Amino acid sequence: MKIKSQTTIIITVCIVLVGIGLTSAFGLWTTQSTKIPDKLSQTENFQKYDPADIRGSYTFSEISDLFNVPIDDLAAAFSVNQNDAKEFKCKDLEKIFSNAPNEIGIGSVRMFVAFYHGLPYDLNETTYVPDHAAQILKQQSSITPEQLSYLERHTVATS
Amino acid sequence: MKIKKSKARTARTITRISVFVIVFLISISKWLSEQGFKIPVLPDASLHAICPFGGVATIYEFATSGDFIQKIHSSAFILMILGVIVAILFGAIFCGYICPFGSFQEWIGKIGGKLFPKKYNHFVPKKLDHLLRYLRYGVLAMVLYNTAVTAKLVFQAVDPYYALFNFFTNEVAVTAYIALGVITVLSLFIERPWCKYFCPYGALLGLFNLISIFKIRRNKNTCIGCKQCDNTCPMNIEVSNTNTVKNHQCISCHQCTSEMVCPVQNTVTISTKEGGDSFEN
């Protein structure tokens, strides 16, 4: 069986379009993150969202809604202008703290959110938060002693 | 005959320009949506979401955790599967007709063809060229390994395709810009240098040329040995020396066929098996 080159491309385009159409119809085709973080499995925190699943594309507004952290605290912790805080994306933190001696980025937000509510956080990770964030965290009653000790050793002076 | 050649070429050109424009518009749309402007008709998808190689890169993560690596969504995985189906049918046709970065190199190569009409695409000594063609399998292995270990899209840092379509954003690594610059300059001397020597997705798709149902075949009884097929092939495959093109480098662009460059009708065709005198389709 022979086939024309135009036919090969028509078949190719049809396969791709039909494939996209079918998977869309079954709800399998997604081009964006659903922005629903994984949930923690430990009994005491069962069904709470896992801060470790915060992605760079999350805005402070989304983090505030999902993890119940006041947006003003997030903005103050990471020196983001209050007016811009709602739409501010975690991945843009590195630009603000580009001169910091240690990396302040998505990991810092994950750590901040976890410590804010005393949620589990892998203390073997080497993550730093800015001193403003540390001050806010120290005022939270839910932070655990281990987390507090870790915080003392992983704070970066930014002011 | 002339009309036929023109039709086949036009179809290929239209396809490549369309895909290039669509990918560029999607990239601009994504960037604009991040700035707060939304283009109604275009999807709010990143380049990663529409690149089938993202699906390949996340295979290990998907197999072990059922999830995708960062920045990769189900769309890329689905496109990868569709790409495999198409490759089983026609070989690496994605490279020859769809890939916008391949088109970009070909268009830059047209300038190279004018600058070096005789030497263009023949600068690299044959033996060295033959060896370098296997480099892309090393790139593929490295990308798969590093992505599996880190669960991150490590390839983005050196991906010239990503740099080309995101040059106006601040998301491109310097190394990717360098890769894009090097490939652009090389394209003036070598046709599709990225595809030939480095592209990990091309490496994978090229393997399907060995098993694809439809292959490019030469009818040795009607071939006049003019070697126009050899001279046209962007990947320097000697079509005139083979009856069935199974070369892992073939991008199924069909430029060698009787529909495009071969002067003898029904001599270089796309078919399921050797022989056959007339087109059934």
Image (cartoon, coloured by chain):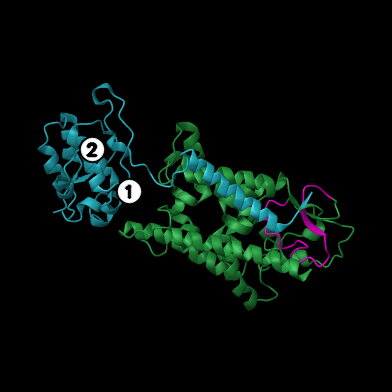
Chain colours: A cyan, B green
Q: Can residue B173 be seen in this view?
A: no
Image location of residue B11, percent across then percent down:
65, 63
Image location of residue B52, percent across then percent down:
53, 48
Give the side of residue A55 with respect to residue B161, left or right.
left
Give the residue furthest to the bottom: B115
Q: Distance of mark 2 from mark 1, alpha carbons?
A: 15 Å
Give the side of residue A143 with respect to residue B41, left or right.
left
Q: Between disc 2 and disc 1, whose residue precedes? A: 1
Residue located 81% across and 58% down the image: B241
Main SS, magenta residues = loop
In this rendering, is residue B104 above or below A95? below
In the image, which residues are magenta?
B247-274
How crowded pointer 2 is (Cα within 10 Å; few <14, some 14-19, many 20+) is rated as some
In this rendering, is residue A144 above or below A138? above
Q: Quadrant of residue A115?
A: top left
What kind of residue is marked 1? Answer: Ser
Compare residues B183 and B34 and report the one nearer the observer.
B34
Give the residue furthest to the right: B221
Compare residues B145 and B62 and report the one nearer the observer.
B62
Does A30 appear in magenta? no
Compare residues B176 and B214 and report the one nearer the observer.
B214
Q: Is residue B53 visible?
A: yes
Residue located 58% across and 69% down the image: B107
Residue designated by label 1: A57
Compare residues B32 and A74 and report the one nearer the observer.
B32
> Where is the C terminus of chain A found, in terms of image quarters?
bottom left
